[in-house]
């Protein structure tokens, strides 16, 4: 008889493995621990029979045994319909009949040292900032087992009677505590409850419990992990408050933009500007000056005081801030009255009575430098206000939209010219320098009909040091599609300034659009790339999959997790995924117009475009040249939709 088979006659779970880890034979105790019939285990590698989290451990202990090293490790074995088994496993080399090398893997009896089985859990809990405890129902006692010191400091003793714990839990959450302690075989998910320390401080705790069997024939006990979410909860509340502010600002910007787009007369334009401008940007008053026959015609919202002796029309040549901004097309910010008098000593030439000694004024032209002067608007602020870069950028965008509206009205070109301006302004000029990344983008509206579309892209740094990239497609090919696209992009920028996770950004934007009862929807892909280590966090809202092109000429298609298109379903979460962008790989983000055509399916189009991008990298082309090649290829195939491409590589 093969003496090695005697090793399987023991009571503890045992298995004999070939050197490659394949199961040669095992006893019923081991088959039970693996929750499989013995015949389903034989011939398969032992780690294939274990959960993913335990496979690397199993590989290491088998490898050490092959090196004639005896190895012990704690393994955690989930068993469907039964409690999880935690046991100490030993692997040692042995020999079968004929001298064939085998590995004997078996569970050890740890009745006298059950605490050894908890060491990995304690260390993992400590590393994750969690606490670990066990509930002993026989004595109604909770025992602190270790973990994060900050969590342990919430409890005065290592042993806590259940009545003491109940007294320190918020009355409304005591039923939750009882449910957690009554954990079944599948355990309880993370559950929040409020806990008051001996010092009287309230903490928001997150707790998770599950029943575990310690040792292959050991006792079953209820273990719990505890996380202190007090700071996170406070931060969440602050974020919700900030999100509320951003939602209101996004609503104001969207309403302002739509109102400008729809103006049909100069009177309507004045009404839109003077009723919204000061309120939108937190000013105390606003003025609008339009060029008519080479002179500026002034009107205000009543929040500014005008010199009665000065006529409402002044020459463009006069030395005043409004005239200068209109002539040059460059915005001005004047911090106080002293600066105003120093830069424009002939104050009588201005129709403006300065709002106050410490008041500030922001003046924005209605057209860019070099264009025909159209006018300017002005916002006055109370003491100490200085617009942020984002606020100034929105101000400039809206002023340019107002200028385009004025030009459209005067030239009787109705909605078409303004829609083109919206498209131009909403598609950003990518930053000249994004540290650690090379980014290139291309856009081309569809050739038939009006050159108006809802495709967009964007790239900008976010506060945590990463770079946000997005590409999307708003429903439609008209004025409203372009305006809606700008609304979505603006909301994403505003929320991304405060929310570091792209999945949460899409969740908030979707909530905003649904709350606004937006008449359209939009698909989108958003990435956050850390150029320092190439970590990419990505999420999709019903958008085209991401393409990964490699320098060796290969490519693959990455289908990001996420959810439905934005603006349709309420209360949707958008899960995200993290992966690494290698330096020999380019990420290619496209809209569906690039990869779909009447005679080309989405899958076929993705494969084709991925091959084009990969060949461009293989040919040594830059991101700019790669984007050009992808766009030219799509145009050559007569794709009938808008086309947008965004290419990014690490430097």
Image (cartoon, helix red, strand yellow):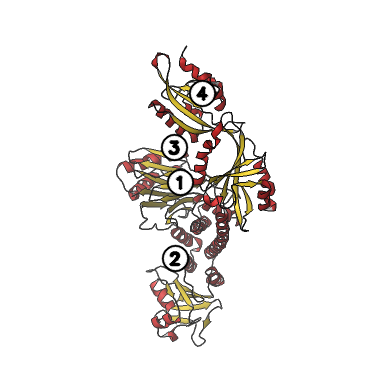
Q: Residue furthest front?
A: 112
Task: Determine the secondary structure under disc 2.
Answer: helix
Q: Are marks 2 and 3 in contact (CB under 8 Å)?
A: no
- Which of these two is toward me, 647 or 81? 81
The residue beneath circle 3 is: 604
The residue beneath circle 2 is: 389
- Which of these two is toward me, 59 or 294? 59
First in sequence, mark 2 or 3: give its number.
Answer: 2
- Which of these two is toward me, 543 or 334? 334
How far is the residue under mark 2 from the one under mark 4? Answer: 67 Å
Query: Which label sits in the foreground, 2 or 1?
Result: 2
How far is the residue under mark 4 from the one under mark 1? Answer: 59 Å
How far is the residue under mark 1 from the one under mark 3? Answer: 13 Å
First in sequence, mark 4 or 1: give its number.
Answer: 4
First in sequence, mark 2 or 4: give its number.
Answer: 4
Question: Eyeballing the image, is 563 above or below 37?
Answer: below
Query: Which label sits in the foreground, 2 or 3?
Result: 2
The residue beneath circle 1 is: 593
Q: Is residue 147 visible?
A: yes
Disc 3 residue crowd, few under 14, some 14–19, many 20+, Cα 10 Å: few
First in sequence, mark 2 or 1: give its number.
Answer: 2
- Which of these two is toward me, 257 or 143? 143
Q: Is residue 561 visible?
A: no
Query: Which label sits in the foreground, 4 or 3?
Result: 4
The residue beneath circle 4 is: 14
Q: Are marks 1 and 3 in contact (CB under 8 Å)?
A: no
Q: Residue furthest top?
A: 1
């Amino acid at each position: 008889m093969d003496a090695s088979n005697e090793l399987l006659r023991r009571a503890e779970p045992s298995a004999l493995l070939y050197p490659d880890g394949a199961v040669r034979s095992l006893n019923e105790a081991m088959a039970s621990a693996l929750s499989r019939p013995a015949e389903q285990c034989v011939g398969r590698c032992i780690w294939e029979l274990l959960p993913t989290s335990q496979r690397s451990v199993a590989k290491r202990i088998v490898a050490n045994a092959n090196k004639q090293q005896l190895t012990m490790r704690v393994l955690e074995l989930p068993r469907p319909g039964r409690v999880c088994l935690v046991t100490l496993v030993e692997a040692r080399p042995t020999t079968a009949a004929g001298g064939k090398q085998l590995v004997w893997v078996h569970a050890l009896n740890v009745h006298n040292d059950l605490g050894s089985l908890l060491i990995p859990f304690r260390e993992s809990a400590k590393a994750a900032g969690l606490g670990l405890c066990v509930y002993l129902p026989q004595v109604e006692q909770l025992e602190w087992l270790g973990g994060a010191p900050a969590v342990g400091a919430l409890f005065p003793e290592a042993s806590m009677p259940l009545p003491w714990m109940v007294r320190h839990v918020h009355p409304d959450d005591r039923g939750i505590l009882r449910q957690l302690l009554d954990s079944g075989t599948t355990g309880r998910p993370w559950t929040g409850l409020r806990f008051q320390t001996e010092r009287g401080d309230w903490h928001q705790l997150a707790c998770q419990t599950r029943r575990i069997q310690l040792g292959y024939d050991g006792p079953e006990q209820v273990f719990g992990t505890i996380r202190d979410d007090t700071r996170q909860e406070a931060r969440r509340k602050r974020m919700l408050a900030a999100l509320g502010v951003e939602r209101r600002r996004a609503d104001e910007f969207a309403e302002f933009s739509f109102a400008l787009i729809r103006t049909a007369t100069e009177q309507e334009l004045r009404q839109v500007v003077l009723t919204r401008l000061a309120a939108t940007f937190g000013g105390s008053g606003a003025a609008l000056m339009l060029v008519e026959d080479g002179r500026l015609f002034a009107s205000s919202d009543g929040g500014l005081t005008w010199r009665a002796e000065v006529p409402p029309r002044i020459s463009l040549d006069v030395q005043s801030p409004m005239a200068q901004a209109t002539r040059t097309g460059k915005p001005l910010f004047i911090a106080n009255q002293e600066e105003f008098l120093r830069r424009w000593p002939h104050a009588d030439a201005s129709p403006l009575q300065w709002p106050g000694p410490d008041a500030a004024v922001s003046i924005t032209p209605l057209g860019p430098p070099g264009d025909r002067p159209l006018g300017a608007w002005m916002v006055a602020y109370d003491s100490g206000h200085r617009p942020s870069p984002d606020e100034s950028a929105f101000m400039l965008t809206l002023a340019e939209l107002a200028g385009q509206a004025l030009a459209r009205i005067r030239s009787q070109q109705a909605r078409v010219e303004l829609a083109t301006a919206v498209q131009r302004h909403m598609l950003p000029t990518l930053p000249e320098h994004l540290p650690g990344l090379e980014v290139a983008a291309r856009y081309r509206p569809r050739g038939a009909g009006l050159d108006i579309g809802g495709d967009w892209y964007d790239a900008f740094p976010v506060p945590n040091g990463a770079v946000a990239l997005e590409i999307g497609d708003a429903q439609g090919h008209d004025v409203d599609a372009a305006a809606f696209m700008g609304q979505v992009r603006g909301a994403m920028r505003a929320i991304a300034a405060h929310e570091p996770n792209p999945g949460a950004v899409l969740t908030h934007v979707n909530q905003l659009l649904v709350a606004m009862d937006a008449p359209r929807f939009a698909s989108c892909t958003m990435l956050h790339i850390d150029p320092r280590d190439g970590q990419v966090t990505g999420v999709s809202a019903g958008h085209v999959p991401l393409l990964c092109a490699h320098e060796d000429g290969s490519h693959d298609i990455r289908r990001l997790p996420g959810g439905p298109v934005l603006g349709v379903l309420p209360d949707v979460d958008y899960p995200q995924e993290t992966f690494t962008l290698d330096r020999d790989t380019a990420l290619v983000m496209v809209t569906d117009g690039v990869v779909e055509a009447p005679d080309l399916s989405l899958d076929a189009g993705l494969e084709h475009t991925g091959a084009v991008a990969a060949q461009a990298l293989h040919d040594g082309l830059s991101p700019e040249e790669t984007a050009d090649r992808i766009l030219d290829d799509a145009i050559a195939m007569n794709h009938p939709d808008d086309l947008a491409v965004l290419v990014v590589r690490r430097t």
